[in-house]
Amino acid sequence: VEESGVIVAIVLGGTALLLPLAALRARRRAPLSRRLSPAESVLDHALERAAESGRSVEVAAVGALKDLPGGGMRTAESWAAAMAAQRTAAAALRHGVTTRVAAGDVVTAELVTRAAGVADATATLRAHGSDLAYAAATLAEADRLPPAALVQVGSLGALYPLAAAGYTAVPQVVLVADTVSAAYAETSGAAVLLGEQMYCFDPSLRETAAVRARESIHAVLRTALIVLVIAGVLMSAASRLGWLQLSWFGV
Amino acid sequence: MDHRLKLSRWPAAVVAAVAGMTVLAAAILPGFPLLREAAAVLITLVSVLTGLVVLTSALSFMVFHARRISVSDEGLTRHVPIVLGFLLVVGVGLFVPVSAAGGPVLPNTLVSLPLQVLLEQLYLPLAAALFALPAFFTMRAMIAAVDARRPAAFTVTLVALLALLYPLLPLDALPVVAVAADWLEASVLTAVVRGVLLSAAVGALVAGVRVLLGQDQPYAEQDR
């Protein structure tokens, strides 16, 4: 058994054990009304307005398949897109608003269409495995069918402004795993969910033990990561100032 | 939507869990040839299915646009170029012969020379023009962000401007600035980028385990 395999098994096994434990703990707690995060509130307000205007909410997924190697977090982003589509559709249904989906590859298109439970006719395949084609098609669609709100999932890097340019008047929630897209999205006024926050996006206001368990696990891991990053920066600063020798830690 | 599994969704959940666990186990335990073979079969099956989905979608796409030519007002301007572009790429990619040792043969790869020439002559100039557009859109978004006085957007704009100006100004002559910029790039920036990557990986890990356990079912068809 390789060393990396053992590490993967420990991490996965640990997470698999933590999830049911967190669910049990969440079940015992007294029910509390769940508050929406700022990004979820953006969508919720847009859905309230859409109930009167009759326009639909759009979930657009860049997609996992790519014509270039080094797709990075693309597969994970496709899963995040499917979950976001499922939860956005549930929230839209609560407000009596229809959902439509769009995707940048055929597999992701099928995944988000099923997850959102929308009719095939409201699903748009904008491209297949090409970021540029997807971004250009998204720009072209903006004038034809402006949505009430846009949930954009997936990293487009420097092409993000091209995809978002037509949606400046539309409330946007952007779920990404790369800092370049996040910076562009922040500049254009979109509500940005970066990294693991992509998987927590849930505007449906469901309050079940499973939802609580998911959120508590994410909160624990998020806090651990923040502590780890801050500790790393402080250690680096201390090392440069000569207050700390990295050799003490075997580095 | 209830998170408990409905009876109709059990088969999909079981297939997802068994397939996922098998591939995962093969990655963790490379010493078991049976697991490795089972994972290889599953991955091949997924590749073949993906290929079929792509093929079906391409045909469906083609039929849709061909039908719309006669019935839509935008037939000539919107649908004809799409159909022609599709036929051109497929035709050149599959049916224009390439030279080989035993004489000309039909290309067996999507990166054949005729297709490369077509892409370089037709697609790349258009792509280059589109790649230039985001610069203008970004500038417009930055001006709008400063105008609207959004703190986060203003900060991003300010940092981007400083990063742009730093190499142009003779700030390296000041010892503190040079050391601080070096430390910011080597430590803080790297830490933030790694933090985001780790964060996305942790999110994917939790989401993956939840999918394997059947707690999340993004693959299952929802009630319409």
Image (cartoon, rainbow, N blue to C red):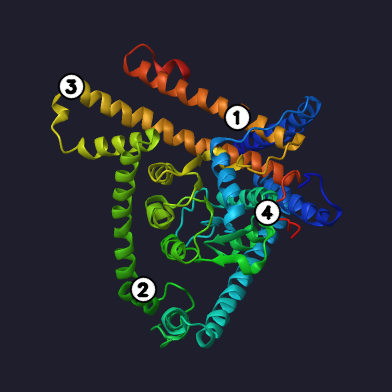
Left or right of B187? Residue A228 is: right
Q: Earlier in the sequence, mark 2 or mark 3?
A: 2
Left or right of A117? Residue A62 is: left
Left or right of A222? Residue A183 is: left
The one of B178 and B30 positioned closer to us in this rendering:
B178
User: Is disc 1 placed on a helix, strand or loop?
Assistant: helix
The one of A144 and A129 positioned closer to us in this rendering:
A144
Give the residue type that dot 2 points to.
Leu
User: Is disc 3 placed on a helix, strand or loop?
Assistant: helix
On the image, numbered disc 3 is attached to which residue?
B175
Image location of residue A10, percent across then percent down? 67, 33
Distance of label 2 from label 3 (alpha carbons)? 50 Å
On the image, numbered disc 1 is attached to which residue?
A221
Give the residue type that dot 1 points to.
Leu
On the image, numbered disc 4 is attached to which residue?
A96
**Nearest to viewer (mark 1 / mark 4):** 4
* Mark 4 burial class by Cα count in 10 Å: few <14, some 14-19, many 20+: some
* Residue A251 is at least partly visible in this image: no
A23 in relation to A176, above or below: above
On the image, numbered disc 2 is attached to which residue?
B119
Same chain under badges 1 and 3? The reply is: no
